[in-house]
Amino acid sequence: MAAGNYKVPPPFDEKKSYESWKNEVEIWRLVTDLEKKKQALAVALSLTGRARDSALEIAAVDLNDDEGMNVLLTKLDAVFLKEETDRQYEAYTEFDRITRENGVSMVDYIVEFERRYNRIRNADDECTTILKDIVKNCETCIRYSKPKPKPAVGLPMASTYNETVAVDLHELEPGVWYLHAIDHFTRFSAGSIVTTKKSKEIVKHFIHCWISVHGPPRRLFSDNGGEFNNEDMRDMAESFNIEVKTTAAYSPWSNGLLERHNQTLTEILMKVKRDNGCDWRMALDWALMAKNSMHNVHGYSPYQLVFGQNPNLPSVLTNKPPALEGVLWLSVVSEVLYILLLVVGFSLMCLELFHSSNVIDGLKLNAFAAVFTVLSGLLGMVAHMMYTQVFQITVSLGPEDWRPHSWDYGWSFCMAWGSFTCCMAASVTTLNSYTKTVIEFRHKRKLFEQGLREEQNYLDQEAFHYFQDRSLQSISSTVEVYPGHGGARAGLVVGGPVPGPGPGPGPGRGKMRGTPASIDLGENTDSLGEEQC
């Protein structure tokens, strides 16, 4: 078919697919200027071969009709679609014959094919990606794919902050509800715990939780419940120039934004109450804070959209070291150790005063008391400094309602340095006294030992001379020295009775010739003195 000549139908060629020709005919029918009655006649005259013969079997009256094209296509389908089915059947028959000859059944072939396909798919993910890309970029698949249904969405009810505020009551337990108000644009939520559904109470809580903080909204959106659709609510709206809108009866989906956030807020509320064991009011406040600071709306949190910044929440990413829990516990432990060491040092000092009978024990107690006092002074200064810093940071970052604006931290620093000074002075004094006493004791002991050694040496010399003189006197009175025979060494004659029958020199006296082993006084004075001693 020539470009722009839409009156001539597309030619039929048996070598091409019959379905493709039918698609071309459908497109031609949409763009041609011919009437519906003439379209079937034009297509029938353009056919050739078996298709023309089949078309000419149809009466001209049936073709010259609005349904003539359907009649013609039905006739051609009976011929050419049947041929395609026959060809498929012949191919299947031939395949079955080959498998039977080779001893492979159709079921076994299908199972083997699926097994190989699954193995390839699991082994190579890239093959799956390529197949998906081919299917995704297939022009035929894109042309005949069903259009995706568009999601049913409504027009936004607000384009600025505090333009539309939706309110609702959600029951927590019998007799306890929370009033939930949410801004449609920023998704900022506010709430209050109520114990009654009276209209005046609802109006009072709405003014307290929303109007007193954000001001009156332009539009108030609620359901048709009696707690909202009443005279008190309308009077309040007229006073603040608020437009009241209500949803249809028994249709919570009409206020779907609020219903969905009710579910989120209730879930957070239940978790907070269970974990902390607080009451409903405290749990609701924390749940609202978490929802407004963590929820993402248009890339920002509701707090940022309303107030321009997020709340100052505790975080390890922004906290300074004194604000961390570990440092606080460290300061508390240091304070406890400081007090404990100070008590131990004081106890040792008292024990030394009341039990001073032994000098050595007193010195030891003084030494231990000094060590404990030094340690307590160091820990006391560190603990006071850390605790002061923790308290100062906590007070600076605390809420405005209890933060002291005029606070003097000088007393704490003075206490820290005063405690350190007293402990160090006491410990240094004790150590000096202990060191002085030990040095004096060692010096006196050294002098005492030296005196003992000198006195011992003197006594040894005196005793030697004394016993030497006594030995010489006793020997000279009883021993006679005479020369020995033949140049022998001098011998000793000791007086006294000598037993034996031989005649002696006289009564009471006797002679004994010295032997070579006799005592030589000049050579053995030392041994004599030692033996005498």
Image (tube, helix red, strand yellow):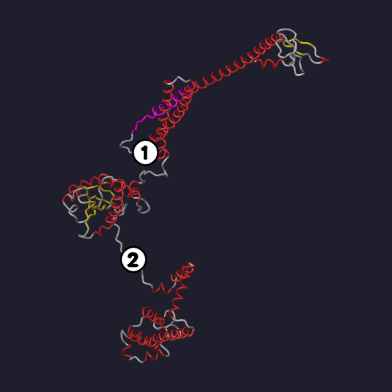
Q: Quadrant of the N terminus?
A: bottom left
Left or right of 12 in this view: 467: right
Residue 129 vertical position relative to residue 416 in the rendered view, above or below: below
* Highlighted range, magenta: 404-429
Residue 34 vertical position relative to residue 156 in the rendered view, above or below: below
What x and y, as percent, mark residue 143? 40, 73
Query: Looking at the picture, which amino acid does disc 1 mark?
Result: Leu
**Residue 360, which numbered label?**
none
Q: Mark 2 points at which residue?
A: 150
Residue 163 vertical position relative to residue 378 in the rendered view, above or below: below
Label 1: few (<14), some (14–19) or many (≥20) C-alpha neighbours in 10 Å:
few
Residue 148 vertical position relative to residue 181 in the rendered view, above or below: below
Left or right of 526 in this view: 183: left
In the rendered structure, does residue 435 fall within the stretch colored magenta? no
Q: Quadrant of residue 66?
A: bottom left
Identify the residue at the far right of this view: 486
Do the numbered discs 1 and 2 sit on residues whose CB atoms are within 8 Å? no
Which is the main secondary structure of the residues drawn in magenta? helix
* In the foreground, 503 or 271: 503
Q: Mark 1 points at which residue?
A: 397
